[in-house]
Structures are given as structure tokens and as C-alpha cells.
Amino acid sequence: ERDYALDRDCKTLSRHVLEQLHSFSPDAQDLSALMNRIGLAGKLIARRLSRAGLMEGVLGFTGDVNVQGESVKKMDIYANEVFISVFKQSGLVCRLASEEMEDPYYIPENCPVGRYTLLYDPIDGSSNVDININVGSIFSIRQQEGDDSDETARDLLQNGHKQIAAGYILYGPSTMLVYSIGRGVHAFTLDPSLGEFILSNENIQTPTHGPVYSVNEGNFWQWEEPLRDYIRYVHRHEGYTARYGGAMVGDFHRILFQGGVFLYPGTVKKPEGKLRLLYESAPMAFLIEQAGGRASTGTQDILDVVPDKLHARTPLVIGSTEDVTLVESFIQDRA
Ligand code: AHG
Ligand code: MN
Ligand code: MN
Ligand code: MN
């Protein structure tokens, strides 16, 4: 009888993308190759993380502050460079926009043939790196519109429906890559002995409700009152459990599979919140909607938000439909 394990091990990431696009669309080969390069970046970052404690120059801070005003980790920079190196040789991507770079990085030799832009958060959850708790990388792929000859990348300031593909890599007990090109959400697990991401979950659908609420309650007194009322509600009602890991990718991954809601609300002082739209909230919103869930600022669908600048931030409420809608009901009652 057929060796099931052999068939499974042949369901690699690049193969899966071609199947998704039925191999005929002109983008199929490009997107398959592009996703493969993302996988290579993930393997390089996973390898570095797995040895972080044993090598010089991996843990700790660089001493610099990035455009976000955050103290930069050495791993932030290494991972940022990995994506640039991987795509420099790819011929597919001619612009990279990252949390760690004020302006996009251009690869002129890839243009105009390379027509994709990669937007990414090279290490999500940097605060976890030095204590060996899971971190992630988040990516979003858009099509460059026009030639961006003045290198202002204004065409990136469009809503999240413009995304062609989105996903993340979760560096956990196993390294997983989760992606969607608009035909469902699929998860792959890295088999280090093969160096391949093998399909482990296809067409993931998030439950319409789940027990988890994921938020940093340390900010409770900085929130607007409706958010405090929502938290008081979940404190009073049976069936909720709090999980917050400090890396959105890990908290999101739990909710994708088990349901629930992740929130990063705005505060009175910073009503726009902390998370960046173009390479954190919008790719995650793309995924959760493909998985049957929702993503909102609290008053507007994340995918409808048009950023005014590359590093624009928005509040985020994301996860199971019922749970996101419940949070919105507290906010909109007061509106
Ligand atoms: P990053 O490490 O890419 O800057 O993102 C960290 C984000 C997100 O991953 C996480 O959920 C959130 O910041 C944690 O913020 P707080 O420590 O303020 O809760
Ligand atoms: Mn950061
Ligand atoms: Mn992040
Ligand atoms: Mn980051």
C-alpha cells in the first residue's frame, strides 16, 4: 500500500503554491518561487535562533533606536538582513519595506521585471528573543503599481485588500510557516532533516468563538472606558482564559487554531495603538479573514484602513467573528 509518509513529505511549500494557483496563472511560478524564498529566510532565522545562546553577537541590543522609537535587538537586524539577502538574488522582488528600515530598500537590478514588494516584520516579539520564548516573522506581498521612480513608495499607502499574499513564520518548538494567497490558510512545519516546509494543516478555519482573550492588561488604566468595560465583562463571565505571550505571532497562532480574540487597543495617549498596519495588522487580517475570522480597529475593518505613512499604526482586535464583534459592541455602544 502507498507509503503515506512519503506522499506527505512531498507536499512541500513551493508545490502547494503551484497547486493553489493550478500552475497555469502567470504568477504561479513567481509566487511559488517567492514563497520558497520566504521559506529560506525562515530557515536561516530559525537556525540562528536555535543557537542564540551559544554564539556571540546574537542576543541583546545593538544600542540603536529604530524608526519606531524601539531599542533594536541584534536579532532584529540579522533577520532584516536575511530577507534582503534572500531576495536580492531572487529577481522577483524589487522593493522591501520593513519595521526596521525607515524607508524601503530598493533592488534596482530586479526592476522592472521584479514586480513584487515584500513588506515584513523580521522579528515579531523581539522582547522574547533573549529569554528563548517564541518569536515570529510576518510578511505581506503587494504588487508594485507604477515605477515608483521617485522612490517614495506612495503606491504602498493603499488598503489591505491590495495584498496578494500574507503569512508568518512561527519560531516555536517547531518552526511553522502559515500563508495564504487568497485561497484559504495553510500551515507548514519545517522538517529540519529535509530542510523542507511540509504541509501540516490545509484550509484552516478559526472557530466562530473561542475561550482565549489575549491582551496586555498592564495597560488597563490607559485604555478608553469601553475597552475596560469589555475586560470587566470577560472577568465576570465563565469560559474565558487569558493568554498573552508578548509576540503577536504566537498569540495569533493559538487563536487561529483554537479561537478567541487578540487585542492591542489604543490608549488615551496613543489612540492609534502600537501595532503597525502594513506589516503586522494587515497581513494578519488577510489571514484571519481567509480563515473565517475578523480583524477590526474597533470601528473599521483592518483591511479597509488606508495608511497615511509607511509605519502607520492602528488599534487591533482580531480573531473569532463572535469575539471581535463582542469587543466592537462595547466600543460602538459608546460611539
Ligand atoms: P515587535 O517585536 O515586532 O516590535 O512587535 C511586538 C509587538 C507584538 O508582537 C506584541 O504582541 C506586542 O508588541 C507586545 O507589546 P507589549 O509588550 O506592549 O504588550
Ligand atoms: Mn519592534
Ligand atoms: Mn511585530
Ligand atoms: Mn519586529
Image (spheres, rainbow, N blue to C red):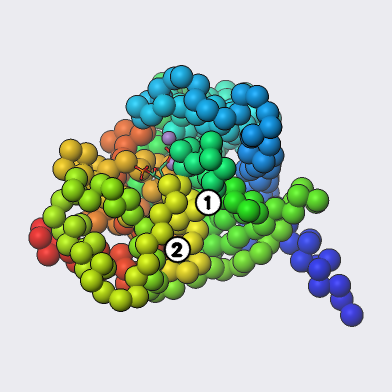
Residue at screen point 35% across, 38% down: 157
Q: Which residue is mark 1?
A: 167
- In the visual, does 289 lie left or right of 50? left
Give the percent coordinates (x, y) of residue 18. 68, 57
Q: Using the image as rendered, state which of residue 322 and residue 92 is in the foreground.
A: 322
Depicted 210 relative to depicted 98: above or below = below
Q: Which residue is mark 2?
A: 255
Could one spot residue 5 in this view of the protein? yes
**Residue type, label 1:** Gly
- In the visual, does 17 lie left or right of 139? right
Q: Report the disc number at residue 68.
A: none
- Secondary element under disc 2, as helix, strand or loop, is helix
The residue mark sitting in front, 1 or 2, is: 2
Residue at screen point 35% across, 27% down: 69
Callout 1: 10 Å neighbours few (<14), some, many (20+)? many
Give the percent coordinates (x, y) of residue 311. 36, 34
Q: Is mark 1 within 8 Å of ligand 3?
A: no
